[in-house]
Amino acid sequence: MSFLLFWYLTSITQLLISLSGAASFEGFKDATITAFLWMIPVLLFPQQVKRITASLGIMLWLFALPGFGYYLIYHQELTQSLMFIIFESNQSESTEYLQNYLSIGIVLSYIAFTLVPLYIWTTIKPYESTRKPANITSFILITLIFMTPVKRAIQYGDINAAYKNLNRHLSAAPPWQLGFGYSNYQRELKEVEAQLLNLNKIPALKNFTETKKELPTTVVLVIGESTTRVHMGLYGYGRDTTPKLSSMKDELMVFDNVFASRPNTIESLEQVLTFANQAQPDLYKTTPSLIAMMKQAGYKTYWITNQQTLTQRNTMLTTFAKQADEQVFLNHGRRQNSYSFDAKVLAPFAEKLLKQDEKKLIIVHLLGTHMKYAYRYPADYNFFNNAEGIPEVISADSDKVTLVNEYDNAVRYNDYIVHALIQQLKQSTASATQSLLVYFSDHGEDVYDSAPHAFKGRNEGAPTYPMYAVPFIVWHSPNWQNAQQLADSAIRHRQYDNADFIYTWSDLIGLTYDGYRADESLINNAFGEDTILVGDPYHGNLHVLDGTIKPVNLPVNTQKN
């Protein structure tokens, strides 16, 4: 009964999260394992079991309450990303939050949550146990729980490796959830603040000008995630994965030869959102970002994201977001394999569109089709559920068919989201307002597309065409300042490295400055075809991506940048 008490207090919330389908059972598994830790003092001091379980039970109960309450409201896990939001909020916002969500149902749920462990505790009785078996069992428990972290520390020669492993697994359960969460929050926040301080020290662009436009002007940048155009009906894929965008294709500029420079979000956006590129990957540290450039032009800037907020991996993303005047963080998940549907972005996007700014930039960062694909769309988007339309070479493998169906369903849901954002922008645009929206994905994904059709995901060490082939779509109001330039259908087939996006964006907005490169703008008459070089630029192993064309008279190891 002692273990049942500890298991309930540490694991019941994770079990509810897993059973609801909001996340996998990985968190529940980790929480269950941590419950064994609290059995050690019970084993060593069996005659004091009532006192020990009471003390530990009260402590676990107190630390479990926040996570349980957050599940009741959001059906998600309490994470350090949420702590980022909490500590960024002021007292007024916190009071409003409590008033909004505190209800009779919540109070009754808390009472039930408390009565169960209280009843379990009343059934616990002292027992006799010999010292030796208790010591052996305690040693086994400690070994099983801490063996992997110690092994990692020895393997990598770094105590931080053990900390990271414990952090990953123990933080699923109280009290570690709040302890590790707050510690991680403080550590990552310091890194964000340090990076933000460095970015803010970067000098502004010189001789900076903007083409005069009718006001108000709204420009939107929608950044997708892990979506390859190889699986988009709009680009000729055999399945109807983009019914919404395809229905309005005559209103869109669909560029069909754009490639990501790197197959991972952070590394890709470090180049896409700055002047960095494969030849000079560290320029993001010393040159202004796209957000800083737009603020220099007098735009009010907003960042809406459904990506995880404050994790070790996403620190740079949060730094970019914090450069904007206002941020909306929507995804508080601790793990990627949990639900956080991109429909979350629609309401805050509509809200920002209503802001009375003369000039504004709204960046929307989607979770898109990020693995695990089944977590990227709601049940009513389970459209593809058989092998129809899947190449014969993989249709005989049921597991592969399932993964392809899940990915295509995620692409179809992503189609709905991007279309909805465009429609919201159209509907909010008055006849005299100029507006523009650009959508692309940070990188693609290979879902058994490349021979021998055995791989899904991304691997920079073994690059394939689908990992880098990304959608690139532009919509603008009829009166956009360079609409005639964009009407040229020939520009839509140009081979382009999206690491140079900041120049295309500058051209779209009408910005010029010292260092602007017209030949790096996808829409400019001076454009020169890009060689698509892939690989890790820090290891000097760049090479031309298979399936792309090397422009004439341009060496393999050269970029125009």
Image: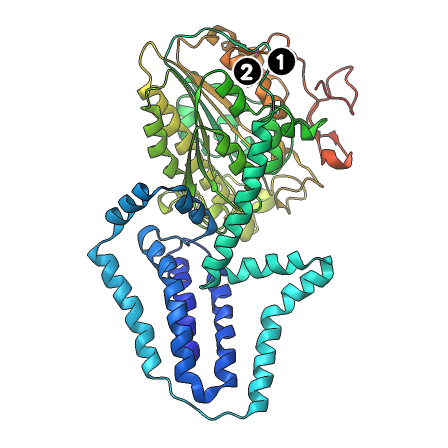
Q: Quadrant of the C terminus?
A: top right
Mark 2 lies on residue:
506
Circles 1 and 2 in contact, beta carbons < 8 Å: yes
Image quadrant occupied by the N terminus: bottom left
**Horizontal side of residue 421 vs 32, given as left or right:** left
Residues under labels 1 and 2: Cα distance? 8 Å
Mark 1 Cα within 10 Å, few/some/many (few <14, many 20+)? some
Residue nearest the viewer, comparing 141 with 491: 141
User: From the viewer's perspective, is residue 306 above or below residue 158?
Assistant: above
x then y, percent, for residue 54: 38, 77
Instruction: Provide the residue designation for mark 1.
Output: 516
Res 302 visible: yes
Q: Amino acid at mark 1?
A: Tyr
Q: Which amino acid type is shown beneath numbered disc 2?
A: Ser
- Where 272 falls versus 483 (above or below)? below
| Residue sitting at x 50%, y 80% | 41
